[in-house]
Amino acid sequence: MRWRGRRESSNIEDVRGGGSNSGGGGNGGGFRIPGGLGRGRTGGGGRRLRGRSGGGFGTIIMLVIAFFVLRACGLNPLEMLAGGGGGLVSNQSDQFSRTNIGTRVRERAPANDEMKQFVGVVLAETENVWHGIFKQEGRQYPEPRLVMFTSQIRSACGQASSATGPFYCPGDSKIYLDTDFFDTLARQFDASGDFANAYVIAHEVGHHVQNVIGVLPKFNKLRRSLGKAEANQMSVRVELQADCFAGIWAHYTDQKGLLERGDLEEALNAATQIGDDAIQKRTQGYVVPESFNHGTSEQRKTWFYRGYESSKLSQCNTRVFEGY
């Protein structure tokens, strides 16, 4: 992706090395990949932004212990890692107070580091695209903020750690991202490349669009009355729509001449590698279709490409609700 030298979004909150606290609730959406994340930084020069893996065996032991502790408490850790409606985020009030938000910074990353520039440019490009789309619909696009953090953070949707994966919180309209996730995506899931990383961000922005147009609020309200299987099925439709919205962004980004050879394939490969079936096969050796809440590899790839090929919101109707 030709991102260098382009405008960076001003909606970046960089609290890496620190922590952010806020209160509230509401279920959002996001990626979830089992396993820990290494502390990382950007690579120099090439198209692939990677970090250095870390954590290793100690991280695995901690995650195994956490798994059984959560099970003992009656919680499903795989559902909690779902981001797109799992138990990690509370399902209480849709109201969010922007008071008493504190930030403690112990070791802040350089303000001009390459990864922050990359994230800022991608977010800015999503702003450009969605402003244009909303304007055509006679509406204004409220820009989300993106919080870059390390280790753990508290959002309006609750406490989260790096192992959660990137997620969007409708309670504060923010995307939360530990960029070491990109390293995990590349090293553990064979989904490398800067446009694979851009797809991750665009997917989370897709959840923000869903929040603005009313999909997420309706989903969060309705899911309280649904059984687990029904909630999972609806969650799949929500996630696939976010993939489709990411594809729409990719279409307009390509029209600007920002995509390089192989970029589209990087995004499609990432969508394939993080399908529920692919993750379950990789992590446990078998699949449990009734537990899917993000969609299969084929579904995620298909809906991303559908958005890319059509560039129309009307083509992203995954039938979450009537009219969406």
Image (tube, helix red, strand yellow):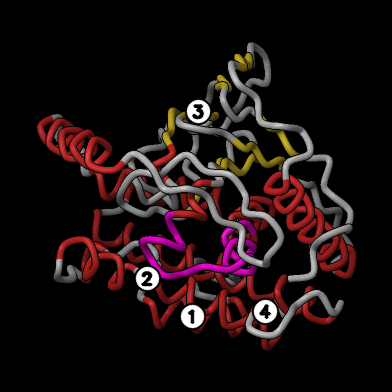
Whether pointer 1 and pointer 2 mark residues with C-beta atoms closer than 8 Å, the reply is yes
> Callout 2, which amino acid?
Gly
Q: Is residue 190 left or right of residue 176?
A: left
> Callout 3, which amino acid?
Ile
Under tag 4, what secondary structure? helix
Q: Which mark is residue 301?
A: 1
**Between 231 and 46, the one nearer to me in the picture:** 46
Whether pointer 4 and pointer 3 mark residues with C-beta atoms closer than 8 Å, the reply is no
Whether pointer 1 and pointer 4 mark residues with C-beta atoms closer than 8 Å, the reply is no
Spatial separation of the CA atoms under disc 1 and disc 2? 9 Å
Whether pointer 2 and pointer 4 mark residues with C-beta atoms closer than 8 Å, the reply is no
Secondary structure, magenta segment, majority class = helix
Q: Which mark is residue 221?
A: none
Q: Which comes sooner in the sequence, label 1 or label 2?
A: 2
Q: Residue at x 52, y 50 (%)?
A: 51
Q: Residue at x 51, y 66 (%)?
A: 321
Spatial separation of the CA atoms under disc 3 and disc 1? 30 Å
Q: Which comes sooner in the sequence, label 1 or label 4?
A: 1
Q: Which residue is mark 3?
A: 153
Residue 26, position in %: x, y?
Answer: 49, 37
Q: Quadrant of the C terminus?
A: bottom right
Q: Which residue is mark 2?
A: 275
Which range of residues does the magenta coloring cover? 184-201
